[in-house]
Image: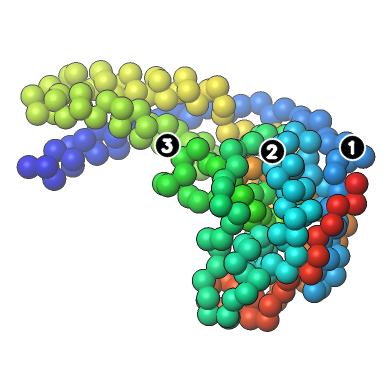
C-alpha cells in the first residue's frame, strides 16, 4: 500500500516537472563590475611545483578572515593537494593530509567548524583560476555551508556558446525541479489525503498551484549567465555547472602555470596524485 501511494505521488511530481519544463522562459544577461584587486588581501602559496599568488575577495569577509587566520596559524603549511581532476579543479586544505599514507582517505578533515555560505553570485562565478570553498553535498548540507579549511582552484575547460545555452537550460530545469520537490514535501500530507480519496481534480489544482509557486520563487533568482560569464567560459573556461552552489572567495593572480602542472599529474582511482604535492608554506603578502 505504501509503495502504491508513493508511486502515485511521484506521478503528480512528474506531471508538474513536465509542465515546468514547458513553461521555461529566457532572461536578459546583465554585466557585473570587476573586483579591484588592489584592495584585496594577497596570499602566497609556496608549493612543491612552484608559487601561486592569490587574492581574497572582500565581499566574502568570513571566508577571507578565516583563510587569513588559517594561514597565520600555519594550518596550510604542509597540506597536500589531495584531490586533482584534470580540466576541473585541484583541491587542498585537509589538515589530516600532513601525516598520511598513500592509501589513506582524505577530504573529511578540517578545523572542526564550517563557515556560513557567502555565495556572491553572479558577480563571482567558477571561471578558470578562482578559489572556492569545498563543502558537503546538499543532501546533508542544504544550507551549503563551507568547509572550515578545504578549498579548490578551478581549472575547467572552454565551452562553446551553444554548449553554454544548453547548460543554462539544464541548470534552470534542475533549479526548478529542486524548488518543486521542496514544495511537494511541504504539502505531502495533503497530497496523500487527496490521492487516497481519488480526488483527481483537486490534485490537478494543487499541481497548478505548485507550478505557479515554483515559477514565482524561481523568477526571484533565475539561472541566467551574464555576458561576462559567457565571455569567460567561452574563452578562458571554467566549471559553470557549479555556479551559485559553492562560495567563490578569491582568485589566482600569478601561478596558473603551476596550477596547470598540478592538474596534469598522474592520480590514483581516488583522484589523489600518485606522488605527493603539497603547500610547503602559506604567507600573507598584504
Secondary structure, mark 2, is: helix
Q: Position of residue 260 (x, y in %)?
A: 77, 67
Mark found first going from the N terminus, 1 or 3? 1
Q: Position of residue 23 (x, y in %)?
A: 44, 27
Crowdedness near tag 3: few (<14), some (14–19) or many (≥20) residues, C-alpha within 10 Å: some
The residue positioned 90% from the left and 46% from the top of the image is: 286
Q: Which is more N-terminal, label 1 or label 2?
A: 1
Residue carrying label 2: 62
Mark identifier at residue 16: none
Q: Is residue 169 visible?
A: yes
The image quadrant that residue 267 belongs to is bottom right
Q: On screen, 231 above or below 285?
A: above
Q: SS at mark 3?
A: helix
Identify the residue at image location x=79%, y=36%: 58
Which is nearer the eye, 26 or 84? Answer: 84
How crowded pointer 1 is (Cα within 10 Å; few <14, some 14-19, many 20+) is rated as: few
Direction front: furthest residue: 73
Residue 66: image location, x then y, percent = 70, 45
10 Å crowding of disc 2: few (<14), some (14-19), many (20+): some
Q: Which residue is mark 1?
A: 39
Residue located at (64% from left, 36% from top):
118
Q: Nearer the viewer, residue 187 or 112?
A: 112
- Compare residues 260 and 102 and report the one nearer the observer: 102
Q: Is residue 283 above or below residue 201?
A: below
Frontmost of labels 3 and 2 is 2
Which of discs 2 and 1 lies nearer the camera? The answer is 2
Residue located at (74% from left, 48% from top) = 69
The answer to whether the residue labelled 2 contacts the one labelled 1, judged by CB atoms less than 8 Å apart, is: no
Q: Position of residue 24 (x, y in %)?
A: 48, 30
Amino acid at each position: 500500500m505504501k509503495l502504491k501511494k508513493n508511486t502515485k505521488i511521484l506521478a503528480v511530481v512528474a506531471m508538474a516537472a513536465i509542465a515546468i519544463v514547458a513553461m521555461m522562459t529566457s532572461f536578459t544577461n546583465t554585466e557585473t563590475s570587476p573586483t579591484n584587486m588592489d584592495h584585496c588581501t594577497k596570499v602566497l602559496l609556496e608549493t612543491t611545483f612552484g608559487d601561486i599568488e592569490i587574492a581574497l575577495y572582500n565581499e566574502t569577509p568570513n571566508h577571507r578572515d578565516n583563510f587569513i587566520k588559517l594561514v597565520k596559524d600555519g594550518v596550510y603549511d604542509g597540506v597536500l593537494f589531495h584531490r586533482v581532476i584534470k580540466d576541473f579543479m585541484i583541491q587542498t586544505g585537509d589538515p589530516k593530509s600532513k601525516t598520511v599514507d598513500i592509501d589513506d582517505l582524505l577530504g573529511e578533515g578540517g578545523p572542526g567548524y564550517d563557515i556560513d555560505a557567502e555565495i556572491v553570485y553572479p558577480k563571482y562565478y567558477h571561471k578558470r583560476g578562482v578559489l572556492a570553498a569545498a563543502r558537503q553535498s546538499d543532501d546533508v548540507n542544504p544550507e551549503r555551508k563551507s568547509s572550515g579549511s578545504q578549498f579548490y582552484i578551478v581549472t575547467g575547460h572552454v565551452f562553446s556558446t551553444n554548449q553554454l545555452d544548453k547548460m543554462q537550460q539544464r541548470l534552470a530545469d534542475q533549479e526548478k525541479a529542486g524548488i518543486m520537490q521542496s514544495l511537494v514535501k511541504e504539502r505531502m500530507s495533503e497530497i496523500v489525503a487527496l490521492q487516497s480519496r481519488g480526488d483527481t481534480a483537486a490534485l490537478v489544482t494543487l499541481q497548478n498551484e505548485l507550478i505557479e509557486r515554483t515559477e514565482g520563487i524561481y523568477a526571484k533568482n533565475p539561472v541566467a549567465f551574464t555576458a561576462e560569464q559567457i565571455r569567460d567560459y567561452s574563452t578562458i573556461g571554467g566549471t559553470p555547472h557549479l555556479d551559485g552552489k559553492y562560495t567563490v572567495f578569491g582568485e589566482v593572480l600569478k601561478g596558473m602555470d603551476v596550477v596547470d602542472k598540478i592538474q596534469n599529474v598522474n592520480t590514483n582511482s581516488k583522484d589523489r596524485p600518485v606522488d605527493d604535492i603539497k603547500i610547503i608554506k602559506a604567507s600573507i603578502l598584504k
